[in-house]
Amino acid sequence: MFKERIYNFSAGPSMLPEPVLSRVQGELLNYGGTGISVMEMSHRSKMYLDIFESVKAKLRETLDIPAGYHILFAHGGATAQFSAVPMNLLGGGCADYAITGNFAQLAANEAKKFGAVNIIYDTSDKNHTYIPRQADLKFTEGASYFHYCANNTIFGTAWDYIPDAGGVSLVSDMSSCILSEPLDVSKFGLIYAGAQKNIAPAALALLILKDGIPIKPIPTTPKVLDYNLMIKNDSMLNTPAAFNIYILGVVLDWIKSLGGLTAMQELNQAKAAVLYDFLDNSTFYNAPALKSVRSVMNVTFRTPNEALDAAFAKESAEQGLANLKGHRLVGGMRASIYNAMPIEGVKKLVEFMGGFERNNR
Ligand SMILES: *Cc1c(COP(=O)(O)O)cnc(C)c1O
């Protein structure tokens, strides 16, 4: 039983900023004098459309999204996009995929159902602890797109550069890093992200899609996954995840209040540095990811053995440091420190880690 909110290191759904939750709570019963909750609004009503348009405008401002890009909201999280991407963009051709972790693999597996997939790099030889270099990537001439996962949530690595795929469109799953730092959107054909890490509650997906990239949905594409219909209907082919989209707007106001994505990036780097500096100076803990490509969002580490890993997860949870157990594919521990995790949480974790080390050496 906790009387206060705890530090939740879950990889997703993860923490939302406390000021966001408080504001949503304040607006929950009667939004802006409308007399109803955003949850109860018709998505076609003026009061909701005002929210919807303002969220898109705020997102465009926050991420500096160029005019030639559509902002779309979809259902089914990032996983639905693993299917929607090939259904809409393969166009009877082939696509290149880089496998740098579990979600990248899942995306490629799904794409194989719909056409030819070239795995142009796979880091599973070293358990996804590294990221290929630009020179390692041999793109297929005429490929419809190149898909990569920018931040590998489970393994704790992140691409430290935006790959240059020549004439091939870049498609990126940014579920676990979007809004954590400034981003040059103009380099991409499509960016997509599930919401439950840095955006809003789960099940919503955000798409930033370049106008004019060839969209040729296969004839059996379900309506709700068809990018042309999504664009044509401004994400309202059916009822959108209206409340989640509203929460994104509140999250964007919070990011702006802190100074936007440049400030967000500094905060995130400062948080990650507290944890990585501690890990680098420890002979007890071991952090498997290659230093130069470590994720700022998901920090993976291990104690000397599995029994201690289990004890660590249990004891930390008892102290209000929740969900530190690593993904079953990696074992050990994982601290997900997305935008909403305050630096105090990371400092408290490091303090706990020091104590745990002293008690178990
Ligand atoms: C969490 C996550 C997903 C899966 O998201 P769902 O919304 O559960 O479909 C996909 N890709 C990455 C990189 C993730 O972190």
Image: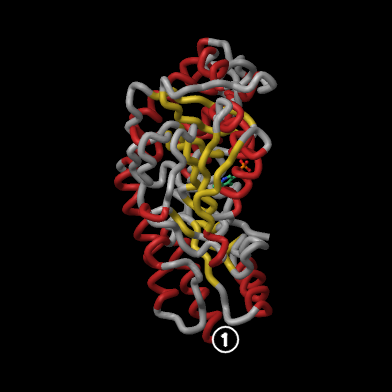
Of 190 and 296, nearer the camera is: 190
Task: Find residue 242 and report its image quarter.
Answer: top right
Give SS at disc 1. helix
Image coordinates of residue 67 in percent, x first then y, are: 33, 22
Total number of numbered labels?
Answer: 1
Q: If the image is split into quadrants, where does the N terminus sit?
A: bottom right
Image coordinates of residue 309 in percent, x first then y, are: 63, 75
Of 97 and 322, nearer the camera is: 97
Q: Please name the residue that numbered disc 1 is placed on.
A: 359
Of 89 and 297, nearer the camera is: 89
Residue at 42% x, 31% y: name it: 189
Image coordinates of residue 219 in percent, x first then y, are: 66, 19
Ligand 1 neighbours mark 1 (CB distance < 8 Å): no
Taking the view exactly as shown, the residue that stands out farthest to the bottom is: 361
Residue at 53% x, 37% y: name it: 95
Residue at 56% x, 48% y: name it: 104
Say which amino acid is labelled 1.
Answer: Asn
Of 310 and 69, nearer the camera is: 69
Q: Is residue 77 visible?
A: no
Q: If the image is split into quadrants, where does the C terminus sit?
A: bottom right
Taking the view exactly as shown, the residue that stands out farthest to the front is: 141
Q: Is 245 situated above or below 200?
A: above
State the colouring used for the structure image.
secondary structure
Q: Where on the image, by quarter, is ligand 1?
A: top right
Residue at 57% x, 16% y: name it: 229
Q: Is 3 situated above or below 140?
A: below
Task: Find residue 74 and report its image quarter.
Answer: top right
Q: Is residue 341 visible?
A: yes
Q: How dense is the environment of label 1, judged by Cα within 10 Å: few (below 14), some, or many (20 and up)?
A: few
